[in-house]
Amino acid sequence: MKHPLPADSRDYQHILLSGIPILDVRAPVEFTQGSFTQATSLPLMNDEERIAVGTCYKTSGQRAAIALGESLVTGTLKTQRIAGWQAWHRTHPEGYLCCSRGGLRSHIAQQWLIETGTACPLIAGGYKALRRFALEALNRLINLPMLLISGNTGCGKTLLLRTLPAGIDLEGLAQHRGSSFGATLVPQPSQASFENQLAVTMMRKAPGSGEYAEFRWIVEDESASIGSRHIPAVFRQKMAQANIIVIDDPLPRRLARLQDEYFVHMACAFQQHYGEEAGWIRFADYLRHGLTGIQRRLGLEKYTQLHRALEGALIRHRIQGDASAHLLWLEPLLSQYYDPMYRYQLAKKQDRILYRGTFEQVQAWLSEVQSTAHPR
């Protein structure tokens, strides 16, 4: 029985905004270097096979490379890879298949599927076309006005951002909270994947026709890097020009937020992921690593004092279940290191500050701005 082959697609916006599943047959190393969140890696060739075929292509041409590829991926190995694609297609019958440029690899995979009775359309131009479209959208949408949310550590900037229609959570996209203690249990995406997801997020949140007049992106006032990921230069340039809204919350309230996020939730997350004992050890090492990361800036004497307090807090936390013990080292860390650094950085941007207030006051101010930007 013939299975009609659906048309290839160049509707990249629909694919990205709808989250249409993508069967990505590039080699694992290519997928790791950059992908989209809706994609599943089921490669036609593994990394070693790809290198061998690529070398053959350069030295002997396409025909020889195809012959080598067919000899490498044959028999049981070929059957297993086709079976994986078929299983994916049964789960995602609306999905598309892609390789790097929409060329030979995706067409071979498509043909092998057709021979087994499965019809899966291609993304014309492959991953590179999708990425090019996404980055072009980012470069276009970044021209819209922007506001930055600033404030001392623990003032709830990310919490607020996630409630706003035009909020862009850069730390969430980068899987890092942007400080020495910012690592999470989820590895950071590659630089390209971070940029891809930032572009898709902006496309999804961008205003419709006629709503551009008062629209503003809302972004946290970040440094150039979030963990090991760099904010795209065009985005960073816009941030450097944007006006700023400052959250001024008292220290006790900030400490309560940080205790909940970094000590209560993180301890639970590590233990749920690794088991109680191993999770606790990894949680303790996570805090030690965070403090060690700023040792040089703190100076030996201050670092030694805080490290001693951290070790004592870990004992109380572990034995007594008292996460508040960490405030004995966190409070001086904020008041003597993070807060002065924040004040120094903000002082250089005084002329760009539009509004200051508590978390609730800033939330109300931004809510009014957003309601004006999204007329009903």
Image (cartoon, rainbow, N blue to C red):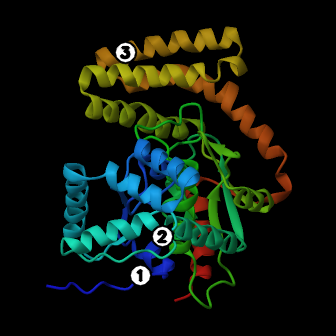
- Circle 1 SS class: loop
Q: Residues within 10 Å of mark 1 (few under 14, many from 20)?
A: some
Measured in 3D between alpha carbons, the distance from the residue under mark 3 to the one under mark 2, in whole angstroms, is 58 Å
Q: In which quarter of the image is residue 22?
A: bottom left
Q: Is the residue 306 above or below the residue 28 in the image?
A: above
Q: Is residue 262 left or right of residue 171?
A: left
Report the residue marked by disc 2. 102
Q: Residues within 10 Å of mark 3 (few under 14, many from 20)?
A: some
> Residue drawn 69% across and 25% down?
336
- Circle 2 SS class: loop
Is residue 282 visible in the rendered image? The answer is yes
Q: Position of residue 273 (x, y in %)?
A: 29, 34
Decide: marks 2, 1 in contact (CB < 8 A)? yes
Q: Tell me the amino acid under the disc marked 3.
A: Arg
Report the residue marked by disc 1. 8
- Circle 3 SS class: helix
Q: Is residue 326 left or right of residue 291?
A: left
Q: Earlier in the sequence, mark 3 or mark 1?
A: 1
Measured in 3D between alpha carbons, the distance from the residue under mark 3 to the one under mark 1, in whole angstroms, is 61 Å
Q: Quadrant of residue 90?
A: bottom left
Q: Is the residue 71 above or below the residue 302 in the image?
A: below
Measured in 3D between alpha carbons, the distance from the residue under mark 2 to the one under mark 1, in whole angstroms, is 10 Å
> Residue drawn 31% across and 33% down?
268
Q: Nearer the viewer, mark 3 or mark 1?
A: 1
Is residue 44 visible in the rendered image? The answer is no
Q: Which of marks 3 and 2 is in front?
A: 2
Q: Going by the picture, which residue comes out furthest to the left?
A: 1
> Residue drawn 39% across and 57% down?
67
Q: Position of residue 61 (x, y in %)?
A: 54, 58
Q: Tell me the amino acid under the disc marked 2.
A: Gly
> Residue 246 or 190: which is nearer the viewer?
190
Report the residue marked by disc 3. 316
